[in-house]
Amino acid sequence: MNLLKKTFEKNFIEHTMLIALPIMLQNGITNFVNMLDNIMVGRIGTDPMTGVSVVNSLLFVWNLCVFGGLSGIGIFTAQYCGKDDDEGVRRTFRLQILMTLLLVVVGIAVFLNWGRPLVSLYLHEDGGGGSAEATMNAALQYLSVMCIGFLPFAITQAYNTTIRSYGETVAPMVASFISVGVNLVGNYILIFGKLGAPALGVVGAAIATVVARFVELSYIVVWANTHTRRVPFVVGALRSMYVPAELVVSCIVKGLPLLFNEALWAGGMAILTQCYSVRGLSVVSSLNITQTLGNVFNVAFIAMGSATAIIIGQKLGEWGESRADDLIEEAWKLTFFSVFLCLISALLMILVSGVFPRIYNTSDEIRALASRLICVAACIMPIQAFNNASYFIIRSGGKTWVTFLFDSFFCWVVSIPAAFYLAHYTQIPIVPMYALVSGSELLKVGIGSTLVKKGVWIRDITI
């Protein structure tokens, strides 16, 4: 009870929200505009909406590979910031740039060569969810343009990860606001052919997204180079790409598990969607509507995860391992606060579950199914918030192999086999199937709470 009381102390909430709120607003606005984009595509018809949804499920895997590749290096960045070691930050930033370039090359090669077979895994006609051929055409048109945006997206993440480690979360938020504004206007003009532009449909949506990513990168680079007192790492950061060999090795040792984890977890999410898609294209369309709304309401625990990583990383660098009890208390407060915010989000999501699907130009069957799936997703959200906080706490001390087992290993050993069995060997309807698979997250709550409580994650890795 004392810990819960401390969680809602004014100073703790103010400090946490100072870091989390800009990230929350950034993610919220981004996902809200993505939702509007999704609705715009959905106004064209079910086939384009489903095609874009499938591609975004695949791109999600690559996006999280970028996140995972930078996260391992970001652990060192946060602790270097806690020590005011700007040269250490500078070196980790260079390593992040090199990592992004590698991932961009790999990502483009994979999607341009194997885009069609990957998309085809999701297309199972059911007589009520659209045409597989039309969906494939829309998906490939969208994917071919989206690959152009890989480079600006990845480099922007490298800048944002480093800038946020200094506690500077407003600049990335502003960059994101500008980007989503460009994206929204571009979508309106290019999807529907407004202001004299041709109506390009899904290709227009992709072009708008790519242009917005270049705009976002331009803003954040200019901001960093004109605010060197607040983010001193940028001074001379790219005059050379020198990184000490021992730091490279340390980052690889700590970072590879996170890269594998994010890749396998995101791949696992894509496979789960593929398992659900066995029930037909109408399920893919309904899941797209569910996930689009869920992304808007998930911003609370996603932002709290980033804030937790920054705060715990800085405290580890500042306090060291001698104040283990204080670190564990800080971790629990961040976890409880994240769950609290998510309970509010879940209630709001349930309230709009019956209204939101009506916006889409699709069948009544898909709208009704989406409403039920939205309610299930909302009920699971507080559990996800707890597990997400546990993940970032454990990761902050460099226990990346533990987070690998906690996150993606669990997905592949528990969630995916359950979904595969239910999809292929039973006739269970999609809603209880979705609830059972998503509900397996409950098992992780006990594992996560034990690891956080024992403090196995408390380690200063920059010594």
Image (cartoon, rainbow, N blue to C red):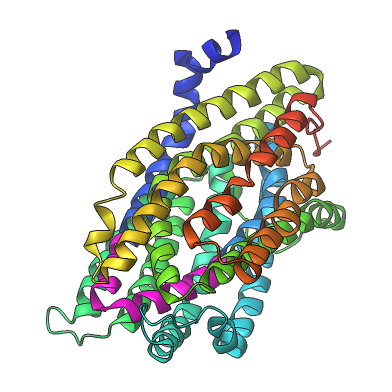
Image quarter hosting the N terminus: top right
Residue 40: x and y in percent read 25, 70
Q: Quadrant of residue 370?
A: bottom left
Q: Nearer the viewer, residue 59 or 448?
A: 448
Q: Nearer the viewer, residue 385 or 122?
A: 122
Above or below residue 420? Residue 407 is: above
Above or below residue 77? Residue 213 is: below
Residue 4: x and y in percent read 55, 14
* Rendered residue at 56%/67% (across/down): 427
Residue furthest front in the image: 427
* Rendered residue at 60%/13% (across/down): 3
Does the magenta segment cover residue 289?
no
Residue 51: x and y in percent read 42, 79
Number of numbered discs on residues: 0
User: Is 160 situated left or right of 245 in this image?
Assistant: left
Q: Nearer the viewer, residue 424 or 13?
A: 424
Instruction: Work out whether residue 179 can be spotted.
Output: no
Residue span colored magenta: 35-61
Instruction: Work out whether residue 51 can be spotted.
Output: yes
Residue 374: x and y in percent read 40, 51
* Rendered residue at 54%/74% (across/down): 278
Give the main secondary structure of the magenta stretch.
Answer: helix
Above or below residue 153? Residue 31 is: above
Does the magenta segment cover residue 55?
yes
* Rendered residue at 37%/71% (across/down): 209
Residue furthest left in the image: 195
Q: Nearer the viewer, residue 200 or 371?
A: 371
User: Is 397 situated left or right of 213 in this image?
Assistant: right
